[in-house]
Image (cartoon, rainbow, N blue to C red):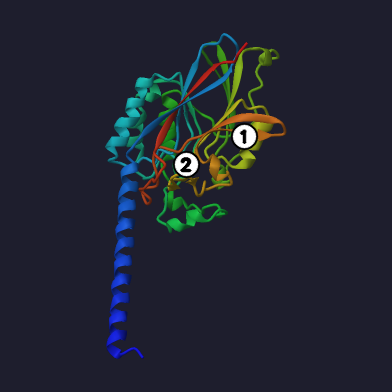
Amino acid sequence: MASHSDFSQALAKTARNTALLAGSALALGTAMIGYGMYETQKFTLRRETLPLLPAGADDIRILHLSDIHMVPGQQLKRRWLQGLAALQPDFVINTGDNLSHPRGVPALVEALEPLMAYPGAFVPGSNCYFAPQLKNPLRYLQRNRSTPRNSPRNALPHEQMHQAFGAAGWVNMTNRNLSVPLKGIRLDLSGVDDAHIDRDSFAGWPSGSASALRSPHVKIALAHAPYQRVLDEFTRTGADVIFAGHTHGGQVCIPGYGALVTNCDLPTWRASGLTNWELDGRSVPLNVSAGIGNSRFVPIRIACRPEAILVTLTAKDE
């Protein structure tokens, strides 16, 4: 029969083990947060090549930006974005969520100014219209989260931002279509507003002249959030390539496994990168950006570094 002394010793040992486990868990959690904050600053450039142009056409280099989530004072991000102008893209596509702070527009415009010397097009995300709110980060682990409720109290100055983009020549593709001539090719653009807040309305493709289909062209679709209904509509109507963002690549990923969530109904294995979206026998390249920034309330990334993407459209094989 155990003595009172034996029981006390066992109890003390259990308490020590519990404290040790708690301390280890706290240290691990602190280390993960520290690493996650470090990884938000490890900006990367992904390069992709797509043979979509008519035979004999010159390459068209498209720089894809998404989810910048600019906050005043982010000097490293500002300098990195400015440095992307050295790539000398032929066209810039911005798929939204540019802001994370009500006073972020001047910093954003300063960061993008060198890139706005090149032609471009953009669509907004919810964090162009409304500032992110402090919330339980575990909500993002819910696969079927409801659409966020946004209030005019949280409105961001997106008109000021869009005016700056437009003044530089970037085309607002919010629920509209437009043709842009570039290097002897007609870029037929079609974009939608953010499906994550149910603002998307597909406007079809530019009709052009009676001979439009016979002239060299490529159909480029732009969306912020890659919801399946949006991807299906683009694919059904003949898109040649789709650009999207929103997912942050999962933001917190498991090495060797990948994203746990996409914050929409896109499968997690498509959370970032270049894949093919298939519908009724059609297969369309889908480029989903892991994004450049993050909500200022969740300043971490794990196994998912921020990125811009340089997509080179090349001629098809004859």
Q: Quadrant of residue 225?
A: top right
Q: Locate residue 100, reporting x and y percent.
A: 38, 44
- Which residue is more in the foreground, 134 or 150? 134
Q: Horizontal and vertical percent for residue 219? A: 60, 23
**Number of marks in the image?**
2
Give the residue type that dot 2 points to. Gly
Horizontal side of residue 161 vs 271, given as left or right? left
Could you say whether the residue bearing mark 2 is in a helix, strand or loop?
A: helix
Q: Nearer the viewer, residue 6 or 287?
A: 6
Name the image quarter holding the N terminus.
bottom left
Residue 236 in sight = yes
The answer to whether 23 appears left or right of 221 in the picture is left
Q: Which mark is residue 208?
A: none
Horizontally, residue 92 falls left or right of residue 187, namely left
Distance of mark 1 from mark 2, alpha carbons? 17 Å
Q: Amino acid at mark 1?
A: Trp
Q: Quick one: SS at disc 1?
A: strand
Residue under the image location 68 percent in, 29 percent down: 282
Along the polypeptide, which appears first: circle 1 or circle 2?
2
Seen in the picture, residue 7 relative to 94 is either above or below; the reply is below
Tell me whether circle 1 and circle 2 mark residues in contact (CB < 8 Å): no
Expressed as whole percent of the image width and height from the top left, the position of residue 154 reads 42, 50
Residue 183: x %, y % from top left: 51, 12
Residue 3 in the image: above or below residue 127: below
- Towards the viewer: 119 or 38: 38
Q: Which residue in the protein does label 1 denote?
A: 277
Q: Nearer the viewer, residue 142 or 31?
A: 31
Q: Quadrant of the C terminus?
A: top right
Residue 249 tag number: 2
Query: Outermost residue toward the top?
Result: 56
The quadrant in which residue 187 appears is top right
